[in-house]
Image (cartoon, grey):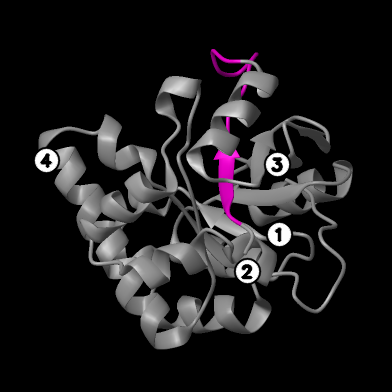
């Protein structure tokens, strides 16, 4: 079973080299990582896939960014509901990310159903549960629980990751199971989410992406 840490940030965006993070990922129980702005390669028997997070604020700009990029896994920073519904329709977009920073109505039951039909997943940065404190942490947990309720009902794909910027931020699979349980996710659901990015491509060669 493929186990993937989606959207980690090696040097120069983060503090640890890609090689060190690949070795840490292997030791933590992963066989694949999606690394921001790094080409596809392999270190320590860990497959590295290229990832990009598009932060443009309009669907038109997102579409242009997707067309400009080459291979990779495309994540788009989520915004208001109308924006999210629009980017879900853009060919080459694979994941919505950053939904913990948005209001509940930014991803409602209509958008959830649409994401399931279009095979666009929702990325959860589990590292936010650790880095946020107090009210901010409770808000992240509440938001992730809201998304979990929608996922269980409509069946869109979850893809989860540590959001690591150094080897100190990376989490073992067991730690991920513990952290996701804080907002109600079961062990089985967590393991499925750790291979979720591959499920988006079950009917095609993996992957042809842009971010």
Q: Earlier in the sequence, mark 3 or mark 2?
A: 3
Alpha carbon separation for disc pair 3 and 2: 15 Å
Nearer the observer: mark 3 or 2; the answer is: 3
Q: Earlier in the sequence, mark 4 or mark 1?
A: 1
For disc 3, the marked residue is: 51
Number of numbered discs visible in the structure rendering? 4
Callout in the foreground (1, 3): 3
On the image, numbered disc 4 is attached to which residue?
135
Q: Residue at x 19, y 39 (%)?
A: 136
Q: Are there few (<14), some (14-19), or many (20+) residues within 10 Å of tag 4?
A: few
User: Left of 94 or right of it: where is 126?
Assistant: left
Q: Which mark is residue 120?
A: 2
Nearer-the-camera pick, 176 or 76? 176
The residue located at (75%, 70%) in the rendering is 201
For disc 1, the marked residue is 93
Percent coordinates x, y for residue 32 in the rendering: 66, 46
Q: Earlier in the sequence, mark 4 or mark 2?
A: 2
User: Would you place residue 160 above or below residue 175 in this image?
Assistant: below
Quadrant for the C terminus, please. Answer: top right
Along the polypeptide, which appears first: circle 3 or circle 4? 3
Q: What is the C-alpha distance between the residues marked 1 and 3? A: 11 Å
Q: Which residues are magenta?
A: 3-16
Query: Do the numbered discs 1 and 2 sit on residues whose CB atoms are within 8 Å?
Result: yes
Dot 2 lies on which element?
loop
At label 2, counting other C-alpha atoms closer than 10 Å, the crowd grade (few under 14, some 14-19, many 20 or more) is many
Q: CA distance from mark 4 to mark 2?
A: 30 Å
Say above or below: 162 vs 180.
above
> In the shown orientation, is residue 13 left or right of residue 92?
left
Callout 4 touching callout 2 (CB < 8 Å): no
């Amino acid at each position: 079973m493929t186990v993937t840490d989606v959207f980690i940030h090696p040097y120069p965006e983060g503090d640890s080299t890609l090689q060190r993070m690949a070795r840490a990922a292997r030791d933590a129980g992963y066989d694949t990582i999606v690394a921001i702005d790094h080409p596809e390669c392999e270190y320590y028997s860990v497959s590295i896939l290229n990832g990009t997070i598009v932060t443009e604020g309009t669907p038109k700009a997102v579409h242009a960014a997707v067309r400009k990029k080459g291979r990779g896994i495309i994540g788009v920073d989520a915004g208001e509901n109308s924006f999210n519904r629009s980017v879900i329709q853009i060919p080459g977009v694979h994941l919505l990310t950053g939904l913990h920073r948005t209001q509940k109505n930014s991803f409602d039951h209509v958008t959830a159903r649409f994401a399931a039909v279009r095979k666009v997943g929702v990325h959860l940065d589990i590292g936010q549960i650790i880095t946020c404190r107090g009210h901010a942490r409770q808000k992240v947990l509440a938001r992730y629980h809201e998304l979990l309720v929608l996922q269980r009902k409509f069946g869109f794909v979850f893809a989860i990751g540590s959001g690591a910027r150094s080897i100190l931020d990376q989490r073992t699979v067991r730690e991920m199971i513990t952290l996701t349980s804080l907002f109600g996710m079961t062990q089985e659901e967590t393991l499925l989410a750790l291979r979720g990015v591959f499920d988006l491509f079950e009917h095609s060669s993996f992957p042809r992406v842009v971010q």
